[in-house]
Image: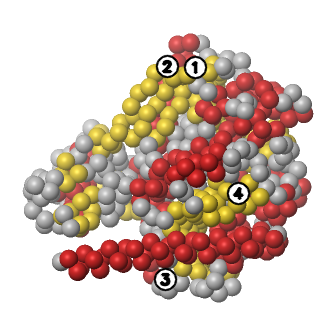
Amino acid sequence: MIYAIASGKGGTGKTTLAASLITLWDGPVTAVDLDVEEPNLHLFLNPQELSSQKAFVEVPEVDEAKCTLCRACSELCQFKAISVMGDLLLTFPEMCHGCGGCFAVCPEDALFPSKRELGEVISGKVGDIDFIMGCLRIGEAMSPPLMTQVKKILNQNTGGDVIIDAPPGVSCPAISAVIDSDCIVLVTEPTPFGFHDFKLAWEAFAPLGKPMGAVINRAGIGDDSVQLFCRKNGIPIWAEIPYDRAIAEAYSRGEVVVQTVKSLRETFARLQQRMKDAANAANQETGRAMSTEVHHA
Amino acid sequence: MHEIVIISGKGGAGKTSIAGAFAQLAENAILCDLDVDAPDLHLLLAPKNLLQTEFRSGNEAIIDLNRCDRCGLCASVCKFDAIELTQRGFQVAPIRCEGCKVCVELCPADAIDFPERHCGSWYISTTRFGTMVHAQLFPGQENSGRLVTLLKQKAREIAEHDGYELMLCDGAPGIGCPVISSMAGTDLAVVVTEPTPSGRHDLERVAKLCDQFKTKVVVIINKCDLNSDQAAQIEEFCKANGYPVICHFPHDHAVTKAMVKGQVITEYDSGPASQLLEAAWKNMLNILHAN
């Protein structure tokens, strides 16, 4: 099963939660950091035996001798990555989304593939746990293509569960991180900002039809709007982690909080069970739906 | 006019709380929330919308099943795995569609429509601290960079027309598309960090991005009393790279309490928290004008 730890608002505790869950997890698990713009999970898990692989997106380059300036490519390109200026066809690799359309429509075979570096995919080991992260090249604007490449490596990993540390927000990078998961954990804090972004995240992820539960971090600060909203909308609250200076301090020292603040162990064990139960229940339901379909057919 | 953007790399470092306080302290500024994905500044400033406009950007592919011959070419050319064969036929998953038009162009049956995408809304509003330009992207949408660019452009037009001297922007977390778009034309980046391994790591990355754009950086260390070793390391990093630290802001429950009341820190609290932010604001203006 793939579990995504997500949130609308940043800084609510996704990485803290992911690191603790991974450390305590019963059974084989792979730790994945898909917050490729600002990956942080490695700072807490300290993976060893690191190996890094550069990731690229394929962009076009022009063979001027073959190009007839017919503009088939520039008229197709939706991202202003290729255009005719005077008697030259110019490419703007940093604008390219790598859709391959220009190669497909060029009647003269005048474009050849070049590449733009997206960043790195880094793998390693935390004890016997596999660790994978993406790290976006500074200056690169597009994170989803790098996330796709991290996920490709992930697909080669068979067996065991996967825990994904997702990026904040609710736009394309966040969706891209949770879309292939079996279960989403939404981490929030009970403040007006936390609540507002929690609602956005719930609206964004609910249409994906995956089991979803909330974790309220720093419970006790702010107000109770998150709890009330969850109750009203039937969102299960899988854990409440009280505000505690000791947790914040452990985090600030780069520690996995569940190892320092032992009283949290029970909360995390319960959270793990709830995540597994929700994912399994949804899985069985899909299985049942499929067997009914087959039966009808 | 000068343009300032408040960013952090790491989310939840305190950008919006500081942006809110600065909005009150600024005398002649247009306010802008460039976190179009998960905006929060409006929760402190309670803007009254004067103008709401739909944001349309890019297009999306939609297969007309009546015209589709089920040849499957679209699914094989799509680099984004957005086209699936369902029981009803080939369908585009809107959430995965990049809007590249390749399937539309190559479909032999001409069966794929390509309507414009309605991605969100943007607003011009009044607040108790002046005019504010902000937006809300629909969940899961792309083109946040284009929306950021549009907001900055609108804010510049208003600033020019109404004689604002400063544009104060609350930015997005991360270092990707919306942050890069918010750097264009920016004179000064205020980077908010916290003394934790994540705060430091993310500060280093976002500051490097600012360097690439040749944008001047000043740093605010929020929750500075959480870990003095980490704070010292951040301090050292800033010194080595010539980023002035304009404020050491201790952890203060007043920040959350102000937020719950819908106030900015400098309204809620007249104690040391507000004094620190006032000093930071003056400090920042001096650095901005020393350029």
Q: Is residue B3 above or below residue B98?
A: above
Q: According to the image, what is the colour scheme of the structure?
A: secondary structure
Q: Position of residue B54 (x, y in %)?
A: 39, 31
Find disc 3 in the rendering and name its residue. A157
Same chain for mark 1 and mark 4? The answer is: no
Q: Is residue B127 left or right of residue B50?
A: right
Q: Earlier in the sequence, mark 4 or mark 3?
A: 3
**Is the Cβ of the residue at disc 2 closer than 8 Å to that at disc 1?**
yes
- Determine which residue is flagged by label 4: A217
Which class describes the residues within 10 Å of circle 3: few (<14), some (14-19), or many (20+)?
Answer: few
Q: Are marks 4 and 3 on the same chain?
A: yes
Q: Chain of mark 1?
A: B
Q: Amino acid at mark 1?
A: Thr
User: Is disc 4 surrounded by few (<14), some (14 to 19) or many (20+) residues within 10 Å?
Assistant: many
- Alpha-carbon span between mark 2 and mark 1: 7 Å
| Residue beneath disc 1 | B126
Instruction: Judge from the rendering whether residue A227 lies leftward or rightward of residue A202; answer left or right.
Output: right
Residue B50 marker: 2
Disc number lying in front (3 or 2): 2
- At 40% from the left and 74% from the top, the residue drawn is A285
Q: Amino acid at mark 3?
A: Asn
